[in-house]
Amino acid sequence: MCGLAGELTFDGTRADRDAVARMTACQSHRGPDGEGSWTDGRVALGHRRLSIIDLSAAGSQPMVDGPLGLTVVFNGCIYNYKDLRRELETAGYSFFSTSDTEVIGKAYHRWGLHCVDHFYGMFAFAIIEHGSGRAILGRDRLGIKPLYLAESSGRLRFASTLPALLEGGGVDTSIDRTALAYYMTFHSVVPAPRTILSGVRKLPPATVRVIEPDGTSTDHLYWSPEFTRDPDRADWSDEDWQDALLASLRTAVERRMVADVPVGVLLSGGIDSSLVVALLAEAGQHGLKTFSIGFESAGGESGDEFEYSDIVAERFGTDHSRIRIDSSRLLPGIDGAVRAMSEPMVSHDAVAFYLLSEDVAKSVKVVQSGQGADEVLGGYDWYPPLADVPRQDAVEAYAKVFFDRRWPDLAGLLRPEWLIDSDAPTEFIEEAFGRPGAETAVDAALRNDTTVMLVDDPVKRVDNMTMAWGLEARVPFLDHELVELAGRIPPELKLADGGKGVLKRAARGIVPDEVIDRRKGYFPVPAIRQLQGPYLERVRDALTDPAAVRRGLFAPEAVERMLAAPNETRTTLGSNALWQLALLEMWLQTNGIR
């Protein structure tokens, strides 16, 4: 929901309204239903609106609350806003709208920085205190909604997308070499606060930043889930955990139905989205709109999973749409997906989500998705090898099964001037795994993937690709209470039955057995995994473009070798390594970074 932008100055100059207007306009795809702006000397805010809650003009942003002396811009949804509104009304607050945006402002006035502890939802917001000039930036616990920052002498700009900051101008667009090492190691993930560009940072998840008028700032981390066993649940049986997980998911799914417009579901045919559909049907949702996508097969790989999504749609009587992507749409879809990326994202799922969202947005404005279940509940195949690894050996074991390549191997892909002097990716994991609150090697991996890798890969992918078409995606498996519960579940219950065992067992009798027992699937885009024809030529064009040659990120001999055998070099997890190189160059060139 929506796109926000803003500028704060710290040197006595007035905020650049024109730059904020450009940044706001750049995000029109995120908010096609309206535009607003607000300026007050050293502060300028802009907003593009996707109307989901309170469709009237009263819900427009930036939202100025004169009596409280606050202005708010906000992207996301506070699912419990009605409950909070009642609580605030009891405390004496009066409301001029029925929007969740107004609730954020009044909640901040009442509870200060602790307002975020009261929010159930996904959000990125900026609050300006009129009297003090103080600014408060906040981001939800799992980083579902983005917030990018560009700071220069005497000025801070922020926006919901990185390209919006570029549109504002004056950004240092040099490549961050440490971020490049992360990109080449973590399947394109660059953990917060870095991005691939030296001049752009992002507010970390679960963080509230207070910015004083002189530019000094303080960060407050307000949430961190525990991946340890709970003594109060020591006597729980397997069935107790299954029942608790199912109850938590029911609540999460119900929360995400709050809207003043219809809500659909992206139905992949896997257990995660299928269970979301099942629980909505169980709660009495009739005529639920569901959507599945399929591509042409390539390189011996199937391009759709309609067999399973059809089973679920028929079982629960949904209004189901099969979306077949003709090959003529795929190549333009790749370019469109790259344009929609706030940061380079190597997963071919991005293209699938982009094209799916284009069609889904013609029918609904809000969808639920099963994204996040694999990270939260142990669905990926790199978790079982960690099961018997001593906690002190977890970093090396995780690196072996998860890293695309190790730090010394970067010398074979990157030109010498882009190499860093130390093994920053391993050091990052050492620091992450070294924090208390993760009991076993599996717990440490799940915590890292849930709070870091998930945020800057699948979560970002879903946000960017759906919002490219003014479609809001909600992710019940990332309800923070469900994540807290999942962190406490013994790892062996998650790894059972080939992964996500506790979820599969909880779903028995609710989701068709064929879906539960099927082999793990994904959004298949075979033409990217098996590069040939025009897709290979698109890759070749990106890597041999004059801009790529001048930039000189990659060793020419490595690029030539991979182009000669485009489907031969694979990462540890089986992804196409050539696509990883090309995608970065495609993104840089698309954004005019020379």
Image (cartoon, grey):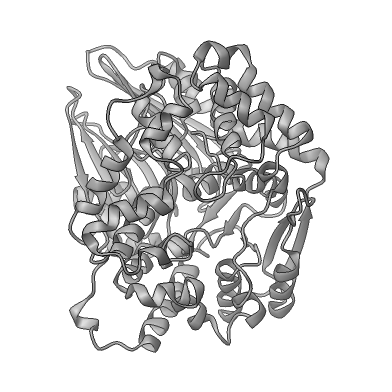
**Can residue 143 be seen?**
no
Which of 537 and 74 lies nearest the eye of the viewer?
A: 537
Does residue 196 lie above or below 55 as drawn?
above
Tell me what residue is drawn at x 79 percent, y 34 percent. 533
Q: Is residue 445 visible?
A: yes
* Relative vertical location of residue 180 with respect to residue 352 in this rendering, above or below: above
Classify residue 283 as left or right of residue 493: right
440 and 594: which one is in front?
A: 440
Taking the image as shown, residue 507 lies to the left or right of residue 434, namely right
- The answer to whether 496 appears left or right of 15 in the picture is right
Where residue 347 appears, as percent x and y from the top left, is 56, 44
Q: Depth check: 266 or 392 in front? A: 392
Residue 71 position, x and y percent, is 33, 36
Residue positioned 33% across, 46% down in the render: 205
Quarter location, residue 228: bottom left
For this view, does 262 lie left or right of residue 464? right
Task: Residue 76 in the image: state x and y as whole percent.
Answer: 45, 48
Q: Is residue 529 above or below residue 557?
A: below
Tell how many labels. 0
* x then y, percent, for residue 254: 49, 70
